Amino acid sequence: MRYTTKHIAFFYALKLIELLYLCGMLEDKNQDRTSLSELGEFGLINHLTKHFKIAHTSTVKAVGDDAAVLDASEKQTLITTDLLVEGVHFDLSYMPLKHLGYKAVMVNLSDVYAMNGTAEQITVSIAVSNRFPLEAIEELYAGIQLACQTYNIDLIGGDTTSSTTGMLISVTAIGKADKEDVVYRNGAKETDLIVVSGDLGAAYLGLQVLEREKQVFKVDPNNQPDLDNYTYLIERQLKPEARKDVSGLLKELDIKPTSMIDISDGLSSEIMHICSQSKVGCKLYEEKFPLDPQVISTAEEFNMDSTMIALSGGEDYELLFTVPIADFESIKTNPNFSIIGHITAENQGLNLVTRANQEIELKAQGWNALKES
Ligand code: ADP
Ligand code: MG
């Protein structure tokens, strides 16, 4: 069944209320809660991991011993880790735990895909306080499991410990790629085209909408959030998808990117990484930025500049890459990709060409910059 935007809006409205209950912002009357201490650490690990199935022959031993065992292949191994901290990277008052689990896996897979590799395994380490009942951790793992099933990933281990205050999640993803397929940040060459998958800025605006609804809800809990106009934005914030498909799409077009990075902090900061590591400059064209209609209308509503959001709003988890200019025709006609600029000589700096045809220098700012403004 395909969900309509109405379904999704309703779902998120319900989730928001449920989450506010869970976080104690509303009085909690009849929720089933199983204390983590009833299970103990080993009971908890077993309970959380027993339903995970192993899909890869490279996974020789997963959860259950002192270490997981992987069968190394001819390929090169890719390893990446991200640590998510409550109150810093996520806010449980509007982030359902299932979504948090899903997202924690996505941010890591995205890094493997940004190397042009295939992800096969993850480890998951969590620190939780007694404030969380077993049911909450089950929700978290339901999201992790959904991500593993959808992206064909084996859960092979982790660590479980207690925390005195907030929740902490660390995921490590392990992947592989043929040596000649790996794409680094440092390979961009002058005249290369700058390309981005999907569209930009939606996840940041989704966060703005959720934060606004949280404030409204605090003042008047009877006020049911109407999220109909923001479904895409909220989905991009709460349920990002890593671009597993891009590597295959490019192979079909017979294109190997010269450099690649995933957009976690915002276009502006990611293109800076590519340019500084490749020792080149760049020119981006404002009119070429791919923006969803909801991004344009909501930016207007929030009195924000959609270009600024595309440049500095993070968490889109799209891929940003460069390709030789010879690939122009095949990239141009592909609906998954937008050509947003080109690489220049290093001494020309990093510039944005506005719709009014003015050139302005790009600033080194990710989503933090937006927060402070
Ligand atoms: P050790 O004391 O040797 O560190 P643990 O009791 O921490 O062992 O872990 C036992 C097994 O369970 C190991 O295979 C470990 O990788 C796995 N594991 C522990 N915590 C988690 C978790 N949160 N998610 C998935 N696997 C876990
Ligand atoms: Mg351990």
Image (tube, rainbow, N blue to C red):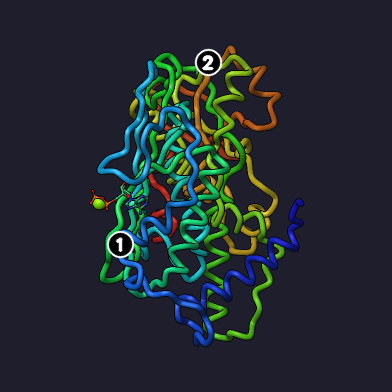
Provide residue 293's location: percent of width, then percent of height: 70, 50
Provide residue 321's location: percent of width, then percent of height: 50, 28
Which of labels 2 and 1 is toward the front?
1
* Residue at the spot 29% in from the left edge and 71% down from the top edge: 165
* Residue at the spot 57% in from the left edge and 44% down from the top edge: 200
Kind of residue at disc 2:
Pro
Q: Is residue 140 above or below residue 178?
A: below
| Left or right, residue 143 beside residue 65 | right
Kindly tell me whether residue 278 is visible in this rendering.
no
Question: Which secondary structure, mark 1?
Answer: helix
* Residue at the spot 50% in from the left edge and 85% down from the top edge: 28
Question: Which secondary structure, mark 2?
Answer: loop
Query: Pointer 2: what residue?
Result: 324
Q: Residues within 10 Å of mark 1 (few under 14, many from 20)?
A: some
| Left or right, residue 187 beside residue 15 | left
Q: Quadrant of the C terminus?
A: bottom left
* Residue at the spot 45% in from the left edge and 81% down from the top edge: 24
Provide residue 346's location: percent of width, then percent of height: 37, 23
State the CA–CA distance, disc 2 to disc 1: 52 Å
* 215 or 28, nearer to the observer: 28
Kind of residue at disc 1:
Glu
Q: In the rendered structure, which disc, 2 or 1, sits on the residue that comes first in sequence?
A: 1
Kindly tell me whether residue 53 is visible in this rendering.
yes
* 327 or 149, nearer to the observer: 149
Asked if the residue at label 1 sits under 8 Å from ligand 1, the reply is: yes
Provide residue 320's location: percent of width, then percent of height: 50, 33
Query: Pointer 1: what residue?
Result: 41
Occupied quadrant, residue 177: top left
| Left or right, residue 197 beside residue 39 | right
The numbered mark at residue 73 is none
